[in-house]
């Protein structure tokens, strides 16, 4: 009983250390991770690399896969990109096993764990963001290996207590059946502890203490690869079909890997034993590194074999998770509520990308508006209704963003992230106001149609010219959210001045036409109101540029 409690306690300390170190790494590398995620391309190879880099940096495949599911739900990543990142995350998560196997058993690093914690904790008292992040990494690192030491102490050594192997012997004599049993054990263990890193540490501890050999450890590793997919499945609950497809792909990818690996397992293990020769029973380092190598080889081989079939696998997943009638094909922001809130420095990229998505909706509204306003002789009721629906959508997006930012602010953010949250809220309001002015313009167009007002060709030309400039402003404002988008601020400043000047010039021209009696007063007021609303859109776009500039 005491051993069981010590194992549970050691596992708890290990998990706390792993989470703390992961959080610190994410906060320290947040800006670089944002660039990796935001710079994602359609290339499946770069997607795999991005998934690998992010997972190595944050030491948590769960954080990466949940973020990928979230972005897929938002329409910010395609299925191909998401699949590639999931593959890369599977490879990246094997780094933890290497760290534990190389440092956790042969090297008595637990002796340095307390000094590392002792040095790291005082750093948290220094008023410096980087220093606090370093403190979190050091304390987490120390707790991780301290927990591993407790875990090792709680698991009896086979050489000292051979009777502890008795219960395992009941399960090891069934050949392939034993392999399947330990695959199931690895799966269940990972589902329970909700961390493939923790379950692989337990597996390595069992190997180091002689409880199981390489064959059964490899079976547990295969099971852990299946069990870790539960995190993505949980994140996809209540999300749209794209998120569910990514979660199903993660499960399908890992299950297929286990299925093809099981028949060739003995050959792969023989290869590993040749690559890392030695007596596992006499040398702990040989035993643990063989397991770590299998973990990496399996995930790399599975990625290499299935990367070329990624499109076919996604087609299969699409059939498994079809589009329901109640779902739309457009992107959603509901993903903002499914992301990991405990890592705000990484998750805040979601808000930035969602703001861009919201702005693109406004840009599409404005393009539709241009057709409505510049074709006064055509009845475009369906297009008008579409614009009204999109304006309501921007309202809903702002509401979701505000809720998300509120949760993000409560997630123990740093001062820098707190300032970003304030900017996100400002930009969400500015973009929602752009949608409001688009709605004002469509209502003015409707009134013009109902009253049968006819604008002169000169007035329509003025409106068309100004709408072209406002459309350019919306386009470069969306581009400003890209990693390399800061350079467009100068262009935005020029455009904002140009839109203001055009508003003033067109006002004077139209006032002159009204004074000459060529244009009825009420008709003239509709034209002037259109100019004002377009100029306001330019102003709010400029506000967004300023907020983004202040965040750099």
Image (cartoon, helix red, strand yellow):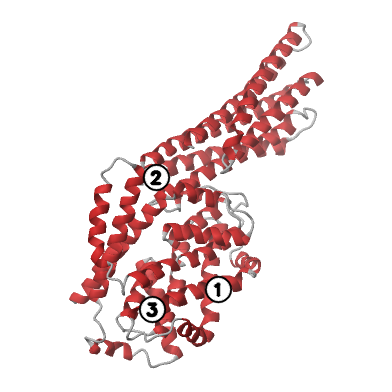
Which residue position is annotated with label 1?
302
Image height check: is 471 above or below 246? above
**Front position among marks 2 and 1:** 1
Q: CA distance from mark 2 to mark 1?
A: 37 Å
Q: Residue at x 68, y 32 (%)?
A: 471
Left or right: 56 as drawn, with respect to 327: left
Which residue position is annotated with label 2?
407
Image height check: is 469 above or below 205? above
Left or right: 547 as drawn, with respect to 390: left
Among the two numbered marks 2 and 1 on one chain, the one whose residue lies closer to the N terminus: 1
Q: CA distance from mark 1 to mark 3?
A: 21 Å
Residue 390 visible within the image = no
Q: Secondary structure at mark 2?
A: helix
Disc ID at residue 185 = 3
Q: How far across and down, in percent of the image, does residue 344 sit?
A: 41, 48
Q: Residue at x 55, y 49 (%)?
A: 38
Closer-to-camera residue (252/372):
252
Image-quadrant location for residue 213: bottom left
Q: CA distance from mark 2 to mark 3?
A: 36 Å
């Amino acid at each position: 009983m005491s051993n069981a409690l010590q194992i549970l306690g050691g596992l708890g300390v290990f998990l706390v250390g792993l989470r703390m170190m992961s959080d610190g790494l994410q906060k320290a590398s947040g800006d670089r991770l944002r660039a990796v995620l935001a710079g994602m391309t359609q290339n499946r190879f770069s997607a795999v690399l991005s998934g690998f880099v992010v997972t190595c940096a944050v030491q948590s495949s769960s954080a990466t896969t949940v973020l990928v599911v979230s972005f897929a739900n938002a329409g910010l990543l395609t299925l191909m990109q998401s699949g590639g990142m999931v593959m890369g995350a599977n490879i990246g998560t094997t780094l933890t096993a290497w760290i534990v196997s190389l440092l956790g058993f042969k090297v008595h690093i637990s002796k340095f764990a307390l000094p590392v914690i002792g040095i790291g904790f005082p750093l948290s008292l220094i008023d410096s963001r980087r220093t606090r992040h370093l403190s979190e990494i050091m304390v987490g690192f120390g707790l991780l290996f301290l927990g591993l030491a407790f875990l090792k102490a709680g698991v009896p050594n086979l050489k000292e207590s051979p009777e502890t192997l008795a219960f395992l012997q009941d399960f090891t004599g069934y050949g392939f059946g034993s392999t399947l049993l330990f695959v199931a054990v690895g799966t269940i263990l990972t589902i329970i502890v909700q961390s493939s890193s923790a379950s692989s540490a337990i597996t390595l501890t069992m190997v180091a203490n002689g409880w199981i050999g390489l064959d059964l450890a490899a079976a547990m590793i295969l099971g852990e690869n299946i069990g870790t997919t539960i995190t993505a499945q949980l994140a996809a609950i209540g999300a749209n079909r794209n998120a569910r497809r990514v979660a199903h792909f993660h499960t399908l990818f890992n299950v297929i890997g286990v299925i093809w690996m099981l028949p060739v397992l003995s050959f792969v293990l023989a290869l590993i034993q040749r690559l890392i020769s030695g007596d596992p029973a006499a040398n702990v380092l040989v035993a643990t590194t063989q397991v770590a190598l299998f973990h990496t080889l399996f995930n790399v081989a599975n990625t290499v074999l299935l990367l070329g079939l990624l499109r076919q696998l996604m087609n299969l997943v699409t059939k498994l998770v079809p589009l329901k009638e109640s779902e739309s094909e457009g992107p959603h922001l509901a993903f903002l509520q499914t992301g990991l809130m405990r890592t705000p420095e990484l998750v805040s990229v979601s808000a930035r990308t969602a703001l861009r998505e919201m702005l693109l909706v406004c840009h599409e509204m404005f393009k539709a508006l241009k057709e409505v306003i510049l074709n006064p002789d055509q009845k475009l009721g369906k297009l008008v209704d579409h614009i009204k629906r999109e304006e309501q959508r921007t309202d809903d997006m702002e509401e979701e963003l505000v809720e998300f930012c509120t949760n993000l602010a409560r997630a123990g953010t740093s001062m820098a992230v707190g300032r970003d949250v304030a900017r996100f809220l400002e930009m969400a309001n500015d973009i929602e106001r752009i949608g409001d002015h688009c709605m004002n313009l469509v209502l003015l167009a409707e009134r013009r149609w109902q009253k049968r007002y006819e604008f002169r060709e000169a007035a329509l030309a003025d409106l068309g010219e100004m709408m072209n400039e406002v459309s350019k402003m919306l386009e470069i404002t969306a581009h400003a959210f890209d990693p390399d988008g800061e350079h467009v601020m100068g262009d935005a400043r020029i455009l904002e001045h140009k839109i203001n000047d055009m508003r003033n010039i067109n006002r004077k021209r139209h006032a002159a036409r009204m004074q000459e009696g060529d244009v009825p007063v009420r008709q003239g007021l509709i034209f002037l109101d259109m100019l004002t609303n377009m100029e306001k859109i330019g102003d709010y776009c400029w506000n967004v540029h300023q907020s983004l500039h202040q965040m750099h």
